[in-house]
Amino acid sequence: MIVKKAVAFAERAHRGAVRKGTGIPYITHPMDTAVIMATMTEDKELIAAAILHDVVEDAGVTEQELKCQFGLRVAELVMAETEDKSRSWLERKSATINHLKTASREEKLLVLADKLSNIRSTARDYLLVGESFWERFNEKKKSCHCWYYEGVAEGLKDLKEYPQYQEYVELCRLVFHGQELFLGDEGLR
């Protein structure tokens, strides 16, 4: 019940939004995050938090709304994953990396599901468009994204027994360090 309710809530909250630089409906990301989470746990509240992880940050939902609709635990998980968009990109990403040093295992699972979904999309789109991919972001330097994704990997290393963590690390390696392997010697033209 809570998962279906979270899907409907997130779909309404993200309606009309698209992934950066694409026409892909944004809701595909929270749904992918939830699918990844469901491969790591049967905990319905964690799966619901995966679905809802961006509704505060990107869709204007309040923490109080989440508490009322989904309970304290789900709201706390979502808030632990929520970035403060009033801060700079570097400040937000540094805060995420620092938070992982003290985050609970559940919070780390949520971050892993979210970031694995993101690096999968990054790998697909980077394969299609090459270096111009980075122009989609406020922080356009590939090296900055590499720093962030590798910092997340370090913060999640106590989840290394999960195949999802191993996939995350491998996709980071391909995107940030294996360009010739990933795109071929000449890249995409």
Image (tube, rainbow, N blue to C red):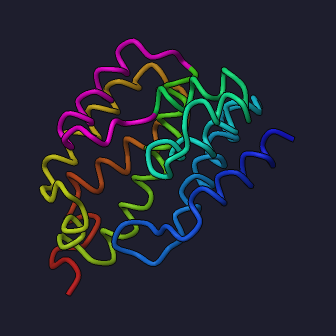
Q: Measured from the top left, where is residue 177 in percent x and y?
A: 20, 52
Front residue of this view, candidates 21 and 133: 21
- Locate the N terminus by quadrant: top right
Front residue of this view, candidates 97 and 179: 97
On screen, residue 124 versus residue 182, left or right, reads right
Q: Which quadrant would residue 136 be assigned to in this image? A: bottom left
Residue name at image x 34 percent, y 73 percent = 21
Front residue of this view, candidates 69 and 112: 69
Q: How many marks?
A: 0
Which residue is at the far top?
102
Front residue of this view, candidates 64 and 29: 64
Segment tinted magenta in the rendering: 82-105
On screen, residue 51 versus residue 131, left or right, reads right
Which residue is at the far bottom?
189
Which residue is at the far right?
1
Q: Measured from the top left, where is residue 120 in percent x and y?
A: 44, 57
